[in-house]
Amino acid sequence: MKLSRSALRAALIAAPLTLAAAGFSIGAVPSAPTKSSKMPVVPANTLEVADSLSSAFRNVASHVLPSVVAIENRPDSTWQSAQDQSKGGAFEGSNPFKGTPFEEMFRERGGTTPRRGPNQSPPSHGGIGSGVIIDSAGVVLTNNHVVAGGGKVIVKTQDGREFIATEVLTDPSTDIAVVKFDGDSNLVAASIGDSDQMEVGDWVVALGQPFGLESTVTAGIVSAKNRGIGITDRENFIQTDAAINPGNSGGPLVNLRGEVIGINTAIHSQGGGNNGVGFAVPSNLAQWVSNQLVSTGRVQRSYLGVSIQPVSYELGTQLGVAPKSGVAVTSVFPDTPAAKSGLKPGDVITKFGGISVTTPQQLQLAVERSPMGESLTVNIVRDGQAMELNYLPETVPGDFGAVATKASVQEGVKLKSLGLEISSLSQEVAKQLGLQDQSGVVITSVQNDSAAQSAGLEPGLVIVQVNRQDVSTVEEFEKMVAADDDGSILLLVRNGQGSRFVIINQ
């Protein structure tokens, strides 16, 4: 189709308008799009969450730091001289935990302070740790190992004041101590929270004086609960990954409400610094100990009078309970609250005073905190049946739990299938083992690489039960073992230190 001259002219005039409408410019190079300078790097909702968490940490720090103190232990000259002579100087001595995973526990006093670097000046004698004020009248909660060793204890507050301790009360069993001094109304006491309400994954903040750096705050989460790591007699630690370093000992571990839920006590470290594994005494235990120290000067504990052990998968199968569902009773001592309540070896304690217990540490701490004069319910499983018993607390006698020495035992009857050699338990041997009036058979030898050795049996142990049946002679033992048809034998063994169940496979 041919266009007329007038139509062609009209089309050429309209073309630039059409291109312009499409976003093109005749005779010009298109320009690159520009970014808005106000565009946020992080989405607004993400920033809001982060700002809220930052605000929570700031509030915790500002609220709790006035209650955190530095504690300096200045040993007297006599004590320090003895330390220097025995350890080769205050910072060159041996750590009592040397060779264990917890060698770098917070023992900042003489001999266990962190190694100093090449550009650091030599530190002064004595030790330094942290603490938290729990009463403005002058009461500080800290660790026993921070103030141990004697000498003058100095409390340094956030505002720069120093107080000399008038009294230091300690409980080495939990590594908790109370430092008392003449306080005033200007001191700020921290709030104590309920450590039982903390769960794994909850945010926590650690405060203290790590490496002598005042008013340091670190954050993390609760990594685990009910930890027993073998550094004190009474353990139920909260594990956290909040950075804890030498000098934090005795300082508070707090929740995001600003409540103290633990007292920082130990770390797992190969080099002395934070490796993300720290431990704190739960506030409920620390407060129970401190209340008694303040009111009476000592800690009074109740006792049950049993030997116990955890319920493993194998033991649970033998006792008819789920693994880790309670604590197995391996022996009941005569004339104790346990005997009076009707507990028997082989019972599995699932609850004590309404509190579920799954580890020996939990049961021990629950028993010890039992109020005198108040009867408590003990829930057990016996031979697969649930039962309830009543427990009336009594104060633990001073000589309870004395360790007896092992006796020398004579050659006995060999059981090749188990790799054991056993003998009758005479009165003389029983007395030497600290097991007077005990019946059973005594292990005289254990063969290397045998089933008995694999089960942890050793000479000097007394076998008192086979598959939940009492045994008193070698002949009875041999018959019971021969009658076992599933190849897995449950033994109850005992020595002067206590009893435990052992599973041995033929």
Image (cartoon, helix red, strand yellow):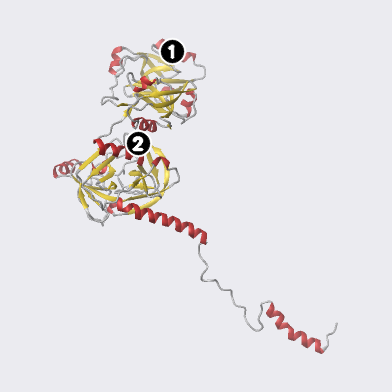
How many C-alpha atoms fall within 10 Å of the one at disc 2: few (<14), some, or many (≥20)?
many
What residue is shown with label 2?
235
The answer to which of marks 1 and 2 sits earlier in the sequence is: 2
| Residue position for label 1 | 478
The answer, for residue 15, to whether it is visible in the render is yes
Q: Where residue 261 sits: x, y (%)?
A: 37, 44
Q: Give the residue displayed 46% in from the left and 57% down from the top.
A: 50
Query: Of all residues shown, which one is farthest toward the left?
Result: 78
103 and 189: which is toward the camera: 189
Confirm whether residue 271 shows in the render: no
Residue 408: which quarter of the image?
top left
Q: Does residue 162 appear left or right of residue 312 in this picture?
A: left
Which quadrant of the view contains residue 390? Answer: top left
What type is the residue that disc 2 sits on? Glu
Q: Is 165 left or right of 16, judged from the image as shown?
A: left
In the image, is residue 366 above or below residue 452? below
Q: Amino acid at mark 1?
A: Glu
- In what element is the residue under mark 1? helix
* Looking at the image, residue 10 lies above or below residue 47: below
Residue 312 or residue 155, whichever sits in front? 155
Q: Quadrant of the N terminus?
A: bottom right
Residue 419 placed where, x, y %?
42, 20
Q: Bin the neighbour count of mark 1 within 10 Å (Cα to Cα): few under 14, some 14-19, many 20 and up.
A: some
Gap in Å between the C-alphas at discs 1 and 2?
A: 41 Å
